Image (cartoon, rainbow, N blue to C red):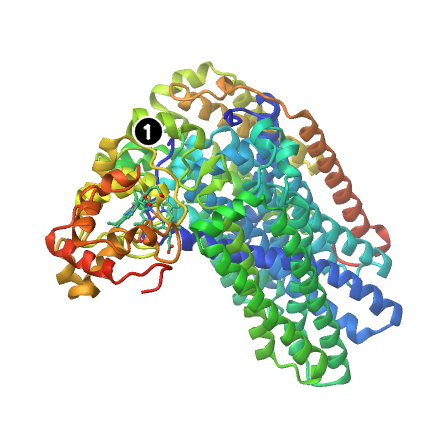
Amino acid sequence: MNLPDYHFFPAPLWLITTLHILTLTLHFAAMNFMFGGIVVILFCKLQDKWQHPVVLQFVKLFPTAMAATVTLGVAPLLFVQLVYPQQIYSASIISGWFWLLIFVVAIISYYFLYAGSFSKTGGNKLGTYLTVALIGLLYISFVYSSVFSLAEHPTLMKTLYAGNQSGLIINSHIGSYIFRWLHMLLGAITVGGFFVGLLGRHDNRIFPVGKRFFLWGMIITMVIGVVYMFTFGEYLRAYMRSPAIWWLLVSFILSLASLHFFFKRRFVISGSMLFISLLGMVINRHIVRLIFLNEHYNPATIPVQPQWSVFIAFLLCFLLALGAVWYMLRMYFAPKHASSPR
Amino acid sequence: MNYPFWDVDIGYGILMPLIAVIHVFVSHFAIGGGLYIVVAETAARKAGDTMRLEFLQRLSKFFVLVSVVFGALTGVGIWFIIGLLNPGGTEVLIHNFVFGWASEWAFFVIEILAAIIYYYGWNKLSPREHLIVGWIYFVAAWMSLFIINGIITFMLTPGEWLTTGNFWDGFFNPTFWSSLVLRTGICISLAGLYALLVASRYPSSPFKAKTVRYNAIWGLAGLIVVFLSFFWYKNAIPGDVMAHLAETISMPFTAIDQLYVYSAILAVGFIVFGLFIPKTFHPVTGVILMIVGLLWFGAYEWFRESARKPYVISDYMYANAIAVADVESLQENGLLPSIAYRTGDDGADLYRRVCRTCHTMTGYRALKPKFDGTDVDFIAAIIRGMHAMKGNMPPFPGTEEESQLLAAHIYNQVDHRHIKTIYNFEGIELGRKVYEIRCGKCHVIGGYNDKTESLVDLSDEEYNDLLDMAGDLGEEMPDFTGDDTERQALIEYLKTLTEGGAQ
């Protein structure tokens, strides 16, 4: 019997990659709002901050930001598994227990964010809730960095697995991803600073806080990014010659420009530039993965058997989703309800 | 065999359902609850029933916490666990159905946002707008069921897809519609169950009585839909699959029996506590009914999963991620060369790839007790004949040499004392044990592949001849490798057998 083969992509690779990169950027944006927002709020030196309306507004928004982060994270997870199954599954199996714990920890963090948003008392309790949620998010981000970095080192995977099969090992080459992880975290805090400044733009105590985190976050993020780049070792040359370097330049310029317009209080243009620079970094991340995997795997070699009818069905569902989201948000924020705080 | 194998001490057969059952329980509630809430809100608005609206608002908070947080994240958990436990099977699904999943994701986005806006919108949106958002929520949630249902049913009944490889053939497969109706019934029933639990915390009052009665009717309505569509569903599974199951494995049928029992308990519970004495509906009753509901749903899922044995995707890939199409070449060229992640211990690698998905050594579906007191040749023969054993197992996907390696690996972990010493049996008792261990794996007296007919009324000599040539009786049948004590005991036991199975 001739059974169907499954080694194919159901759409051209460029299309899948585009969807992957776009949804991943959105996921990061939502994650940055939540993670960065929590850090900025927890670490800003603001007296009576737990009574401050902008801070409380953030606290109320965090669960929804978490929902957005998770929801927007599902799509890129789907695409990364489609294109890099052998890398992603293998790396996650090697760190199986740590990987599996992610969703349990996410549930806990989520409930703590809700506990914060429902809490009427304010005060130190809020700080505790957010701290617990933050610890959970740190765990998740670390495991992600570790596993996704491991996935880019097929030989290391084989060695690690040969030594232990129980899923209780974590990527031992910390040097190869600690800066990647820190770069992500600091980047998130930078964007968090942007959002805090944005929502607190009319408040002369909050806005400077956002500004400070945005500025210093960006400087430190860039420094760590450069350090991370130098951990590429033998791959650095290939990286320097790839289109990634142009994207890096674009991101670099746009982030500085974004900072500039932020200081000038031109938030729409600043935010757009920040988003595009984030997109540029996601593209960088994507190209770096291809460079690292190059000797082992190139997705372009997988045959394409397009399922156009299914893709069109998806597109319709997706447009419907955009429409529904727009419709509901418009309804919710309609001016007739302008009396309410949000 | 491109993946490492996650060697966890907990059996795969426990880990997977643990997450999956909790997720499906919550996610089906998230759908049924959506319908419940809009229908009830419409009625309450019409009647101007503020108490009921308050109840619904309370329910919706519970609803957001449970469905948006727990439902969504355990769903992500399922993604994680299937990738860990069966990356090969997941890869097949994702290549074929990625845009199905992507479409489901689009509805998931709508669903999550609608749930949040519905919850925060009680005092912010006009009644009409609020109801619209509620309906958007329900339709989106049900659509995501519609899509995922196509993929889940595909795994049991891939239908025409096996020859065409066409997405739509796989999606709208033979059990698609019946399963969709059945799951919708489950959603409705679960909505009733959850609403009962929330209502149970109200003090006894006419309002409580009305609400509890209303919720019980939801529970019952769903139950009836499930009951009827289950027969449709069962009939939609190709007849030869069911017939084969009936011969080889008891689990799906045990699951069906359980399904009936739990349905009956639920029905009685809804009628007695919900319809007759609703005023005093106690939280404990609510919790108990909820647990029965969980078992009830679990029994259905167990039926579906066990009916798929030995496959992860029927007729396409076995549960241990060996593609049906690859078996022949693996038997010829060996499994080991195809394993990308080797550990240096070939026997252990083979054990993980071939048996470990469904067995552990001493825990879940333990192998050790099945082989205690036997010998390596026997184990190797059993491995080569695994597809002939009861339990509906896949064929051994390796060479004869590999079966020896695997057998040696298992043999090293079993009890090497004599069967007689291990179980402390004598005479006929011992003979029965020998039969159970050396023959019963493939011939159950009065059951699976029964050979009693050929084993009764023989002379000592004939019994000895039979055991001497055991290996020639059937392709998968092992030589009799037990010692004289075992042989005499077995013969003594066989002599007690009579035609018709009873002894």
- Residue at 58% across, 30% down: A21
Q: Which image quarter is the N terminus of chain B in?
A: top left
Residue A114 to residue B148: above or below: below
Q: Is residue A45 visible?
A: no
**Amino acid on which the number 1 mark rests in the picture:** Gln
Image position, residue A175 (x, y; %) = 33, 34
Q: Is residue A180 above or below residue B222?
A: above
Q: Position of residue B109 (x, y in %)?
A: 67, 45
Image quadrant in which you'd find residue B60: bottom right
What residue is rendered at 59% in x and 44% in y? B153
Residue sitting at 34 percent across and 19 percent down?
A: A234
Name the residue nearer the viewer: A152 or B370. B370
Relative side of B260 to B319, left or right: right
**Residue A311 or A113: which is nearer the viewer?**
A311
* Image quadrant containing the C terminus of chain B: bottom left
Q: Position of residue B170 (x, y in %)?
A: 61, 35
Q: Which residue is mark 1?
A: B331
On what subunit does the disc labeled 1 rest? B
Res B114 visible: yes
Residue B96 located left or right of residue B214: left
Q: For label 1, count other residues whose C-alpha is less than 10 Å away and answer few (under 14), some (14-19) or many (20+).
A: some
Residue B462 as seen in the image, left or right of residue B33: left
Look at the numbered disc 1 and give the secondary structure of its residue: helix
Q: Quadrant of residue B456?
A: bottom left
The residue closer to the viewer here, A177 or B180, is B180
Front residue of A88/A48: it is A88
Count of all numbered marks drawn on residues in the image: 1
